[in-house]
Image: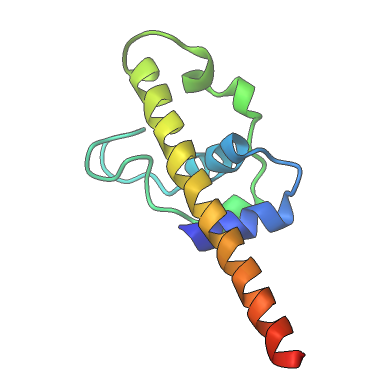
Amino acid sequence: MSGVVALVRAKYPELSAAEVIHRIEATADDRGAPGRDDRYGWGIVNPLRALTEDVPPLSASPTATSSSGSAARGHGLRRNTVLVVGGLIGIVLIAAAGVTVAIAVRRA
Protein backbone atom coordinates (compact mmCIF):
# COMPACT_ATOMS: atom_id res chain seq x y z
CA MET A 1 0.00 0.00 0.00
CA SER A 2 2.76 2.45 0.85
CA GLY A 3 4.32 1.82 -2.56
CA VAL A 4 1.06 2.79 -4.28
CA VAL A 5 0.87 5.92 -2.11
CA ALA A 6 4.41 6.83 -3.14
CA LEU A 7 3.60 6.31 -6.82
CA VAL A 8 0.43 8.42 -6.63
CA ARG A 9 2.24 11.18 -4.73
CA ALA A 10 5.05 11.14 -7.30
CA LYS A 11 2.65 11.46 -10.25
CA TYR A 12 0.28 13.91 -8.54
CA PRO A 13 2.44 15.95 -6.10
CA GLU A 14 -0.26 18.62 -5.77
CA LEU A 15 -2.70 16.19 -4.07
CA SER A 16 -3.23 16.32 -0.33
CA ALA A 17 -2.99 13.13 1.74
CA ALA A 18 -6.81 12.90 1.79
CA GLU A 19 -6.92 13.25 -2.00
CA VAL A 20 -4.30 10.52 -2.44
CA ILE A 21 -6.40 8.18 -0.29
CA HIS A 22 -9.51 9.14 -2.22
CA ARG A 23 -7.78 8.35 -5.53
CA ILE A 24 -6.63 4.94 -4.27
CA GLU A 25 -10.05 4.07 -2.84
CA ALA A 26 -11.94 5.32 -5.91
CA THR A 27 -9.84 3.19 -8.27
CA ALA A 28 -9.76 0.01 -6.17
CA ASP A 29 -11.22 -3.12 -7.80
CA ASP A 30 -14.50 -3.66 -5.97
CA ARG A 31 -14.97 -7.16 -4.52
CA GLY A 32 -17.80 -8.62 -2.49
CA ALA A 33 -20.84 -6.42 -1.89
CA PRO A 34 -20.88 -3.19 -3.94
CA GLY A 35 -19.11 -0.32 -2.20
CA ARG A 36 -17.35 -0.75 1.13
CA ASP A 37 -17.82 -4.06 2.94
CA ASP A 38 -16.29 -5.73 5.99
CA ARG A 39 -14.32 -8.32 4.03
CA TYR A 40 -12.68 -6.23 1.29
CA GLY A 41 -13.10 -2.66 2.55
CA TRP A 42 -13.18 -0.43 -0.56
CA GLY A 43 -11.70 -3.23 -2.68
CA ILE A 44 -8.35 -4.47 -3.93
CA VAL A 45 -5.84 -1.70 -4.60
CA ASN A 46 -5.15 -1.29 -8.33
CA PRO A 47 -1.97 0.76 -8.82
CA LEU A 48 -2.42 1.13 -12.60
CA ARG A 49 -5.93 2.52 -12.22
CA ALA A 50 -4.80 4.79 -9.37
CA LEU A 51 -2.18 6.32 -11.67
CA THR A 52 -4.15 6.54 -14.92
CA GLU A 53 -7.90 6.97 -14.35
CA ASP A 54 -9.78 10.23 -14.09
CA VAL A 55 -11.10 10.49 -10.54
CA PRO A 56 -13.76 12.99 -9.44
CA PRO A 57 -12.50 15.52 -6.89
CA LEU A 58 -12.74 14.54 -3.24
CA SER A 59 -15.43 17.17 -2.65
CA ALA A 60 -17.65 15.38 -5.21
CA SER A 61 -17.42 12.09 -3.30
CA PRO A 62 -20.76 11.06 -1.72
CA THR A 63 -19.07 9.97 1.51
CA ALA A 64 -17.15 13.24 1.76
CA THR A 65 -20.29 15.38 1.66
CA SER A 66 -22.92 13.19 3.28
CA SER A 67 -23.58 13.11 7.01
CA SER A 68 -26.16 10.34 7.31
CA GLY A 69 -26.20 6.56 7.68
CA SER A 70 -23.47 4.39 6.23
CA ALA A 71 -21.98 7.31 4.33
CA ALA A 72 -21.12 8.99 7.63
CA ARG A 73 -19.54 5.76 8.88
CA GLY A 74 -17.61 5.56 5.59
CA HIS A 75 -16.36 9.11 6.12
CA GLY A 76 -15.05 8.12 9.56
CA LEU A 77 -13.32 5.14 8.02
CA ARG A 78 -11.75 7.35 5.38
CA ARG A 79 -10.47 9.70 8.09
CA ASN A 80 -8.84 6.72 9.82
CA THR A 81 -7.38 5.62 6.49
CA VAL A 82 -5.94 9.09 5.97
CA LEU A 83 -4.30 8.92 9.39
CA VAL A 84 -2.80 5.49 8.72
CA VAL A 85 -1.57 6.34 5.24
CA GLY A 86 -0.31 9.72 6.43
CA GLY A 87 1.74 7.84 9.02
CA LEU A 88 3.03 5.49 6.33
CA ILE A 89 4.03 8.45 4.18
CA GLY A 90 5.90 9.89 7.16
CA ILE A 91 7.73 6.59 7.70
CA VAL A 92 8.69 6.42 4.02
CA LEU A 93 10.01 9.99 4.11
CA ILE A 94 12.02 9.33 7.28
CA ALA A 95 13.46 6.14 5.76
CA ALA A 96 14.37 8.01 2.57
CA ALA A 97 16.13 10.69 4.62
CA GLY A 98 18.03 8.00 6.51
CA VAL A 99 19.17 6.36 3.28
CA THR A 100 20.26 9.75 1.92
CA VAL A 101 22.29 10.45 5.05
CA ALA A 102 23.86 6.96 4.96
CA ILE A 103 24.89 7.44 1.34
CA ALA A 104 26.35 10.87 2.08
CA VAL A 105 28.33 9.48 5.04
CA ARG A 106 29.73 6.62 2.94
CA ARG A 107 30.83 9.03 0.20
CA ALA A 108 32.54 11.36 2.66
**How far from the left and from the top, in percent, is residue 30?**
38, 44
Displayed quadrant of residue 73: top left
Q: Residue at x 62, y 76 (%)?
A: 99
Q: Nearer the viewer, residue 107 or 28?
A: 107
Residue name at image x 52 percent, y 44 percent:
86
| Residue at screen point 53% across, 41% down | 21
Return the residue nearer the eye: 81 or 99.
99
- Residue 17: percent from the left, percent from the top? 60, 40
On the picture, is 105 further left or further right than 70? right
Most extreme residue toward the top, as rendered?
68
Which residue appears at 57% of the width and 42% of the height? 23
Percent coordinates x, y for residue 68 in the rendering? 37, 8
Q: Is residue 32 visible?
A: yes
**Frontmost residue, 95 versus 38:** 95
Q: Quadrant of residue 74?
A: top left
Look at the image and tell me whether residue 49 can be seen. no
Q: Quadrant of the N terminus?
A: bottom left
95 or 60: nearer the viewer: 95
Q: Answer above or below: position of 87 versus 55.
A: below
Seen as rendered, the residue at the extreme left is 39
21, above or below 68, in the image? below
Residue occupying the far bottom of the picture: 107
Q: Check the picture and name the quadrant holding the C terminus.
A: bottom right
Q: Is residue 101 above or below residue 71?
A: below
